[in-house]
Amino acid sequence: MKDNYTPTLFPQSESIESQDNRYSLPEMLLELKNERTTSYFSKEILDQLEISKIFEEKRIARAKGKK
Amino acid sequence: MISNLKALVVDDEEHVRTYIVLVLRKLGIGTILEARNGEQALEMYKQERPDITLMDVNMPVMNGITALQRIIEINPEAVVVMLTSLATRQIVEDSAEHGASHFVRKDTSKENMQKIINEIISLFIDVESKASVS
């Protein structure tokens, strides 16, 4: 039996690098815009309640912008 | 006074114009003008400066979205309500982005349409100031 034995579970020599993708805000906004204009989402039929909600939000945003 | 308001109704289908005119008359709007397409609407807008414009999206010669953009270029404060039978998210959002005050589906009941137009008038138009005009 070896006294100084230590099991190695992970490779010690290689550092683990993050593999996440990073997007800039303009890239993400462009992607979102493309998604909204080209996908099924853009062809979704809205009822009058949803339409009124969109315009109400726009109106509030404009009013806030004017302040 | 609401009777001093001037409205412009734009649609290539005569029966739709008749329906909208009826709704506006019920509300008590005094002057109602009619146009058959975006180009005609633009000319009428320049000459008559209506207080509120109700305009179809899909029309020949010049569509409603282009006419909306031109009207907003002339008067950024113009009150334009878009009308359509096919309200896709893209058309609704395009209209909002280009400065429409609201968007009404043509299949909305007469009562609900009156209610919506009444709300738009009270939100965007200073009706009292119109009493001294005319």
Image (spheres, coloured by chain):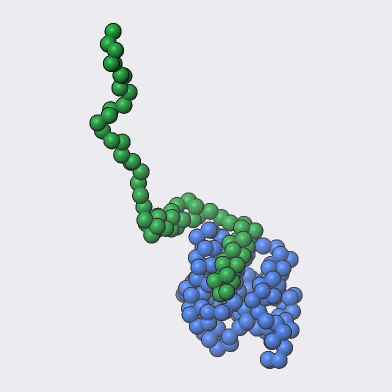
Chain colours: A green, B blue
- Name the residue located 56 percent from the left edge and 55 percent from the top edge: A45
Left or right, residue B42 beside residue A9? right
Residue beneath the point at 66% across and 74% down: B123
Q: Quadrant of the N terminus of chain B?
A: bottom right
Examine the image and state in which quarter residue A12 appears: top left
Q: Is residue B13 visible?
A: no
| Residue at image coords 71%, 64% | B112
Locate residue B51, reporting x and y percent. 62, 82
Q: Nearer the viewer, residue B14 or B46?
A: B46
Q: How many marks?
A: 0
Nearest the eye: A61 or B58: A61
Q: Residue furthest left?
A: A13
Residue found 53% across the figure and 58% down from its top: B89
User: Could you tell whether B102 is left or right of B43 in the image?
Assistant: right
User: x, y percentage for residue A66?
Assistant: 56, 74
Q: Is residue B71 above or below residue A1?
A: below
Instruction: Assign the C terminus of chain B to one quadrant of the image.
Output: bottom right
Q: Nearer the viewer, residue A66 or A3?
A: A3
- Give the x, y percent position of residue A9: 32, 23
Q: Quadrant of residue B121?
A: bottom right
Q: Nearer the viewer, residue B36 or B65?
A: B65
